[in-house]
Image (cartoon, rainbow, N blue to C red):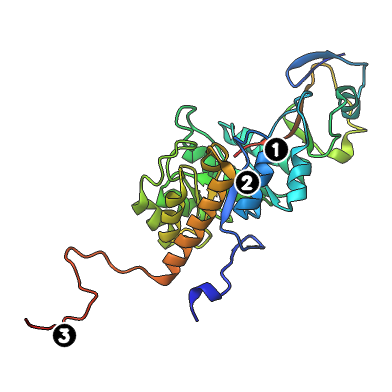
Amino acid sequence: MAVTETRDTFTIGDRELTSRLLLGTGGFRSLEAMAAAIEASGAELVTVALRRIDPGARGSLVDVLAAAGVQLLPNTAGCFTARDAVLTARLAREAFGTDWVKLEVIGDEHTLLPDALALLEAAEELVDDGFVVLPYTNDDPILARRLEDVGCAAVMPLGSPIGSGQGLLNPYNLRLIREHAGVPVILDAGVGTASDAALAMELGCDAVLCASAISRAEDPVTMARAIRLGVEGGRLAFRAGRIPRRLYAQASTPEEGRSEF
Amino acid sequence: MNVLVNGEPTVLEAGATVQAVLAALALPGGERGVAVAVDAEVVPRGEWPAHRLSEGARVEVLRAIQGG
């Protein structure tokens, strides 16, 4: 049976997911634009953040997301210490009634790269507290292993810095992470366009998390569809098994039986 | 009694509760998706009516925004 006909899901914690595209909700111009992009993306899991209440805010994000039928994945964006990230995760559990968390502990405000040591510390504490932890991590195979060892439900290595749209800067490391991980690997951050998402999936990633590439595109709905198709195409290519790279040509037309003039 | 609500100096009656702070904020969209920390500790929703604030308390009232 061709791979296209078989059921192809993956599991995080105890949740089986069909869509391999996770959507970040940051950066959309309006709640309406976000809702339309969610539908086009097919995402089942979308990220949200927590901030101080804004009395002037219009519309209810949680109501729009509930209407979209998606599962919320709260993040700890903007946290620079393990302590802040752990507290933010606990507040998110209270606010949204979910023990899932996209754990971010940022080390530097210019690159937004993860602080590896603080990330591992926070991950361990949250796992012990019963959270399903999905850490946004460096593309470091050893750190990914350590995060899995402390009980993270997935690892989410970056392709390149958040919002940079630089794609996958170190496919080699991502492949090493995938080779050794026993939990889902979700490419997080750096996707700029559909081909980046396809490449991540061709490397064997289980899913791609994408925010800015969709939300800040000129036409977010069309880009959501494009990246969705990129993810699906890359996944099928991975499962189908690509041909090896060769230095020289190899004719696809048989050599035998050629005419001689 | 002086407390800080989301960093803003706020005067409340002595012994005011977390629930009273939320009522005073008159949150648009209600209290769904809202979480509260007092002095860097989560106060579960069920404890809002009973949790009394003390002088100088730092209250953070958070809600979902688009992000990530």
Judge the density around disc 1: few (<14), some (14-19), many (≥20) Cα neighbours within 10 Å. some
Say if A72 sits above or below A20 in the image: above
Q: Which residue lies at the image location 62% right of the left edge and 34% below the top edge?
A: A83
Q: Which of the chains bears the disc numbered 2?
A: A
Residue A94 can be seen, yes or no: no
Q: Which of the chains bears the disc numbered 1?
A: A
Tell me the element at label 2.
helix
Which quadrant would the C terminus of chain A be assigned to in this image? bottom left
Residue B35 left/right relative to A226: right
Q: Which residue lies at the image location 76% right of the left edge and 27% below the top edge?
A: A57
Instruction: Tell me how far mark 1 sits from mark 2, CA to CA.
Output: 10 Å
Q: Which residue lies at the image location 53% right of the left edge and 46% below the top edge?
A: A223
Instruction: Tell me how far mark 1 sits from mark 3, CA to CA.
Output: 62 Å
Q: Quadrant of residue A62?
A: top right
Tell me the element at label 1.
helix
Q: What residue did someone put label 3 on?
A: A256
Say if A77 sits above or below A54 in the image: below
Sequence-first disc among 3 and 2:
2
Q: Position of residue A163 (x, y in %)?
A: 49, 36
Q: Which mark is residue A127?
A: none
Q: Position of residue A198 (x, y in %)?
A: 44, 55
Q: Which residue lies at the image location 58% right of the left edge and 73% below the top edge?
A: A7
Q: Which mark is residue A37?
A: 2
Say if A257 sits above or below A13 in the image: below
B2 and B27: which one is in front?
B27
Q: Quadrant of residue A55?
A: top right
A256 and B43: which one is in front?
A256
